[in-house]
Image (cartoon, coloured by chain):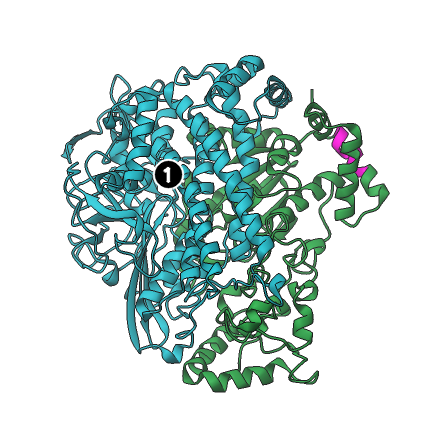
Amino acid sequence: MIETYYSLMRKQGISRRSFLKFCSLTAASLGLGDAGAQQIAQAMQTKPRTPVVWLHGLECTCCSESFIRSAHPLAKDVVLSMISLDYDDTLMAAAGHQAEEALEQTIAKYKGNYILAVEGNPPLADDGVYCIPGGKPFVDKLRRVAKDAKAIVSWGSCASWGCVQAAKPNPTRATPVHKVITDKPIIKVPGCPPIAEVMTGVVTYILTFDRLPDLDAQGRPKMFYSQRVHDKCYRRPHFDAGQFVEHFDDAGARMGYCLYKVGCKGPVTYNACSTVRWNEGTSFPIQSGHGCIGCSEDDFWDKGSFYDHLTTIKAPGNLGIEGTADRIGLTALAAAGAAIAAHAAVSAIKQARSKSGNDKLSEVEK
Amino acid sequence: MAILQTQGFTLDNSGKRIVVDPITRIEGHLRIEVNVDKDNVIRNAVSTGTMWRGLEVILKGRDPRDAWAFVERICGVCTGVHALASVRSVEDALAIKIPKNANIIRNLMHSTLYAQDHLVHFYHLHALDWVDVVSALKADPKKTSELAQSISPWPNSSPGYFREVQNRLKKFVEGGQLGIFANGYWGSPAYKLPPEANLMAVTHYLEALDFQKEIVKIQTIFGGKNPHPNWLVGGMPCSLNVGDTGAVGAINMTQLNMIGDIINRTIDFIDQVYIPDLLAIAGFYKDWAKWGGGLSGQNVMSYGEFPDIANDYSNRSMLLPSGVILGGDLKNVQDVDLKDPGQVQEWVTHSWYKYSQEQNGLHPFDGVTDPNFVLGPNTKGTRTNIENLDENAKYSWVKSPRWKGNAVEVGPLARYVVAYARGNKEIQEQVNGALKALDVPIGALFSTLGRTAARGLECQWAAHKMKYFYDQLLANIKTGDLATANIEKWEPTSWPSEAKGVAPCEAPRGSLAHWVKIKNTRIDSYQCVVPTTWNAGPRDQKGQIGAYEAALLNTPMVNPAQPLEILRTIHSFDPCLACATHVMSPEGEELVSVKVC
């Protein structure tokens, strides 16, 4: 018999009333109405668990760690009741050839119907020898598993963009998934790591509605990545009022002023940190006093220091609503002197090399 | 050559070769090959890191204040340890003194990681080596409840509670989709727990999965997120404001209250769930006090951790002391100096890198990392389809670090042995209590069981230290001290044209250090030697084996086709392979070291 999410919840002693409430809350959190709640309830009562294969390339496992931090739903419930995590070398009991057999069984049994989740990326330099789990280049494994997958989820900035090992000079030629697999739908869920509830939110969306979420031009789910951290930042009024932290731990920092001048990349970073927040809504980087480092953006490692302020964002307030970040930038540059000027030159070169998309951080020109 | 004698061990690779790749339930990618004799006893072991990311190369030319964020991404499991080592090493280079609050907050974040990481390791990465999930289906929930209540006051222990979990498991198994439990070694005679203990442990596997996410919220409050919280050269980025205008925009009373609450719950969970489970499970596996000791009875090392006094990393300040023990001589604990070019050195004789003179080791300030993927003549398979490696040639992406030429083990067991030998009363009492509870001699420490037990004890120690640091923080705030960052040397114009620094960090998995050179305000070289490098590294130029290889030797396997024994011992180290990151310059002239955390 096939186990469904609903049957599991009931077995756990959760009443039908609570179950329906859960569906309503889920629907509401996804911006759906009553009809959505009914769809969720229907889906959870009838569907078998979707097989998921979770591969790891060059990575640091922060995505897996983030995933198990999910509070709504709990990672436990995702793994036991919503998906069937048939292969994941971080969590699975079997090792060695028994692990590889489990992978082969899933591919054979669910051909065309499993989801491939990828954490990390394949290095392509030197025949791929920089990542050889099972004695073979990871890129081969990725291609083989992708071939019969229904869709691919690129977890985190490694799989989505390349992330830290792909930062210049990218010694292993670490390459994001979509540049290796070009014939499958790919959902990018960037971030280093992505927010836990964003990860499980993407999974539950796919399971519930039996379709992939709407994606933006860069392949990210619109529901979580279509607005900037800055747009919904609770410190935004301080930005608008021209109230800035000038140095870490100054009076402004203790008042919770805007971190723009100490390098916050919130104005050019598309993510849900300022709304969903982290670890069950406990906080997010800006709330804890450090600027956003832009970890969900392509090439964020190669856009200058995390403490250089942005230069293309209008900063109203004490500079007047006509003031721009460029003016603030020039002032800061003059103060910081030759060291920063030298760095700016380096940054400008890096920027020239980088293939830029929309809303890239713009480097100081000189 | 079939026989090799080294460090008191005999290696014989003439028997049947067994390959386990991937080793699952670890961080990163690791391969183990062993040879077993006709009685299925392991007589040769080969440990291979199968990934390399090149992070240190990437750091060259960057702002040293940014380095923590790059190196933090070496590892997302022991998240933050590389960031902490990084800010400390840059502060060492630039002679920056951090405020007292910053030291306390760092200690609190770091002890938080110890508690969460050790807990997750035990239940989610290690437990399935000892706990038979399928056997739990046969348990009587009432007896499970009696068992649980006999060892702990933990309230989730009613027969109905365990029955509910069991029913959920039953449903899961009957559904036919076994997910992460598919193809496990269920039913193997190597599993010794009665069904009731299995059900209790599986229940706590699920409960710990729910609870671990609570512990890390302390890192989220101070660092904004977890994994990968934010840090700052010169202190911490989180300002304190408990009573003044705008306190709601800083670390304030509500957040401090939340932290206090999480700490109390963490202590309860570890005291009442982890430790009783650990002792109960260990009681059924006392055989494992005979196997898996490897180097631990000979050579162990700790750099020391948790500075009680800000900016003082000497043993006057460290709550867990530093030191090296060689040859099992507990009466002679030697001091570690990370700047001494003759102490920490790395070899690449059997690693996929090249040195101009491979008979020599290099100190990390002079480190070179130049990849060189070549396989030995006795390799079976091809470059891109390896069946068996040739351990007489190069065979791993991990280097071989040595302390004064000696292979050493690092990690919780090593830290505890050093602390015990240094006369740390707190640790001695804790260890003696556990030995007594299990009714085993002190020699039992030097084993797979001892390594796993030491991690549990350290988790408990860390949880109680969280409370200690929290009380310190409140007491210091009470004095009116709110400073969290020293920005006197924030601007690069205040730095000397050249500087170099090194700093230790005992990560959950063992001794970590970063060596940084700064030139004209930019990183000139950056090197990390990380815990799993020490433990997982291959042989050196003398043929000396590392901790993993030593620990596997002489262990009998119940069934070589089911590598449970290999998993038990390797997991007892809590491998973390992603840190295999070396540096090389774009010109290829100078490089760095490898890591694994």
Q: Nearer the viewer, residue A23 or B302?
A: B302
Q: Is residue A90 above or below residue A157?
A: above
Q: Which residue is mark 1?
A: B458
Residue that sits furthest to the front in the current view: B479
**Would you identify the image quadrant in which residue B23 lies?**
top left
Q: Secondary structure at mark 1?
A: helix
**Residue A319 pos. (x, y %):** 64, 84
Q: Is residue A44 magenta?
A: yes
Q: Nearer the viewer, residue A201 or B81?
A: B81
Q: Magenta residues?
A: A39-46
**Residue B379 pos. (x, y %):** 28, 38
Q: Check the picture and name the quadrant holding the N terminus of chain B.
A: top left
As drawn, the chain in green is A
Q: Nearer the viewer, residue B38 or B416?
A: B416
Q: Say which chain tag 1 marks.
A: B
Image-based side of B475 in relation to A48, left or right: left
Q: Tell me which residue sits at (76%, 32%) in the image.
A: A19
Q: Is residue A63 above or below residue B522?
A: above
Can the viewer see residue B293 in this picture? Answer: yes
**Would you identify the image quadrant in which residue A227 lies?**
bottom right
Q: Nearer the viewer, residue B287 or A247?
A: A247
Which colour represents chain B?
A: cyan
Magenta stretch mostly in which secondary structure? helix
Amino acid type at image mark 1:
Glu
